[in-house]
Image: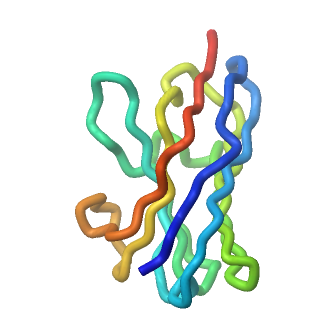
């Protein structure tokens, strides 16, 4: 088990940037795949990005590729999501999550944070 809590959300204008952080507690952080998901109003939860425990291998949804960067610091039990060139369609609650396998499927992530709101105004 790993406990996760997100921070860094807020209101930003189109084209702006935000950096989301996820602080973890627990002894198994480095063993987890860490991912970011988001859920916009009236929409299903969707995969955004994931990073392997090695901190090198990454995966991004096509909608954010080239704009978002996921990173992790196993020593400090942190995973971040740098979001640049934000668009109104990025507006959602963003969740940090952990999984035991390399996957985009939210159902396979067994640890979730509370979420942080990101709102991008046009």
Residue at image point 51% right, 88% down: 28
Where is residue 52? Give x, y as percent. Answer: 52, 78
Name the image quarter holding residue 75: bottom right
Vertical arrangement, residue 71 with respect to residue 19, above or below: below
- Residue toward you, 48 or 32: 32
Judge left or right: residue 73 versus residue 30: right
Q: Quadrant of residue 51?
A: bottom right
Position of 61 with respect to 44 (left or right) is right
Measured from the top left, where is residue 65 in percent x and y? 55, 48
- Colour logic: rainbow
Q: Is residue 105 above or below residue 102?
A: above
Q: Is residue 21 left or right of residue 94?
A: right
Task: Please give the name of the residue rendered at 43% of the width and 42% of the height, measured from the top-left corner.
Answer: 38
Q: How many marks?
A: 0
> In the image, is residue 113 above or below residue 2?
above
Res 16 → quadrant: top right
Q: Quarter holding the C terminus?
A: top right
Q: Is residue 60 visible to us here?
A: no
Which residue is located at x 68 percent, y 69 percent? 78
Q: Position of residue 5 (x, y in %)?
A: 57, 58
- The residue lying at 50 percent from left, 45 percent from top is 115
Foreground pick, 26 / 107: 26
* Residue placed furthest toward the top: 122
Which part of the image, by quadrant, shows the N terminus?
bottom left
Q: Nearer the viewer, residue 111 or 32?
A: 111
**x, y (%) of residue 3?**
50, 70
Regarding residue 12, the answer to whether it shows in the image is yes
């Amino acid at each position: 088990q790993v406990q996760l809590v997100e921070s860094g959300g807020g209101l930003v204008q189109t084209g702006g940037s935000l950096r989301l952080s996820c602080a973890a507690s627990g002894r198994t952080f480095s063993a987890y795949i860490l991912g970011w998901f988001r859920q916009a109003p009236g929409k299903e939860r969707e995969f955004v990005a994931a990073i392997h425990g090695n901190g090198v291998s990454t995966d991004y949804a096509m909608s954010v590729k080239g704009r978002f960067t996921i990173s992790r610091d196993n020593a400090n039990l942190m995973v971040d999501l740098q979001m640049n060139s934000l668009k109104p369609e990025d507006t959602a609650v963003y969740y940090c999550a952990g999984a035991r396998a390399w996957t985009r499927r939210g159902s396979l992530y067994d640890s979730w944070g509370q979420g942080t709101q990101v709102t991008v105004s046009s």
